[in-house]
Amino acid sequence: MSDTIHTATGTRPKRRSIGTLLILAVNLPLVAALALLLPLDYRREMEDAITAKHASLEEEAMTIYQGLSFLGQKDRRESVQKYIDTVCARMQASRSPGHHIVVHWNGRLWQSDAHHRPSPEILLAMQQAAVSSDHRADVGDQTLVVGTFAGNGVEVHVSEYTTNIRRSIRREILLHLTWLAGLAVTAAVIVNVVLWRIVTHPVKRLSSAVSRIAHGDYELKANGFRSREMNDL
């Protein structure tokens, strides 16, 4: 298709209709905003979920610490191990695959063994996460987030994999973002319909009337527009 229009005075470039220009002006910024904001909002909500999980792990660590304070001096090693194993066992491995507990008490070390996760690697990762600014550390191909509570010579660390946190919250976040995108699309449709009724359709009517007049239909009356400016034209 040619990009020029031939007229009696020569040729001129073919231009987009006012309807096309309005659609582009309204919809392109909206699409660009959605393409930018939705991924940013997704990442922000994911980070908020991990931050909330860290707070929950710190509360769990504090609860474990308070429970440890009731253990007596006799057979402490066996009592502590049994206690943290019992607490960790309550977390189902399928729902919380990265849940792990580490206790430091007066130079002694305990790791929960309920799900057979104790290892030097996970211990090192939890110790690194406990002193990092984001409370996270890598172990293998996974990332741990760790909640810590300490006092009176006792340190309690509780961990969870960030991938598990993301997986559990992903569906909820995607539903939320889908709702936002649907609301934006609905608003765009309403704006497009209003623009079509107020601007695009009247301009097309007027353009058609001018074309007919140009071809000799001098009796034509182009009126009945909703706006004063279109009727004046």
Image (tube, grey):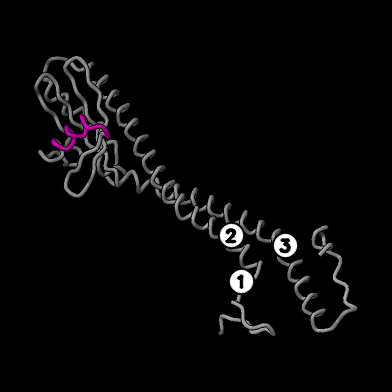
Find disc 1 in the rendering and name its residue. 16
Q: Quadrant of the C terminus?
A: bottom right
**Which amino acid, mark 3?**
Val
Q: Which residues are magenta?
A: 124-134
- The Cα atoms of the two marked residues, 2 and 1, are separated by 12 Å
Q: Along the horizontal axis of the image, is 50 left or right of 177?
A: left
Q: Assess disc 2: are there few (<14), some (14-19) or many (≥20) residues with their C-alpha within 10 Å of its C-alpha.
A: few
User: Which SS class for mark 3?
Assistant: helix
- Judging depth in this view, the residue of 212 and 74 nearest the camera is 212
Q: Quadrant of the N terminus?
A: bottom right
Q: From the viewer's perspective, is the residue at label 1 or at label 3 nearer?
A: 1
Q: From the viewer's perspective, is the residue at label 2 or at label 1 nearer?
A: 1
Majority secondary structure in the magenta region: helix
Marks 3 and 2, the one that precedes in the sequence: 2
**Residue 133 counted in the magenta span:** yes
User: Where, by quadrant of the figure, is residue 115 drawn?
Assistant: top left
Find disc 3 in the rendering and name its residue. 199
Up-down relation of residue 204 to residue 104 (above or below) = below
Marks 1 and 3, the one that precedes in the sequence: 1
Q: Position of residue 65 (x, y in %)?
A: 24, 21
Q: Position of residue 171 (x, y in %)?
A: 43, 50
Q: Position of residue 62 (x, y in %)?
A: 28, 23
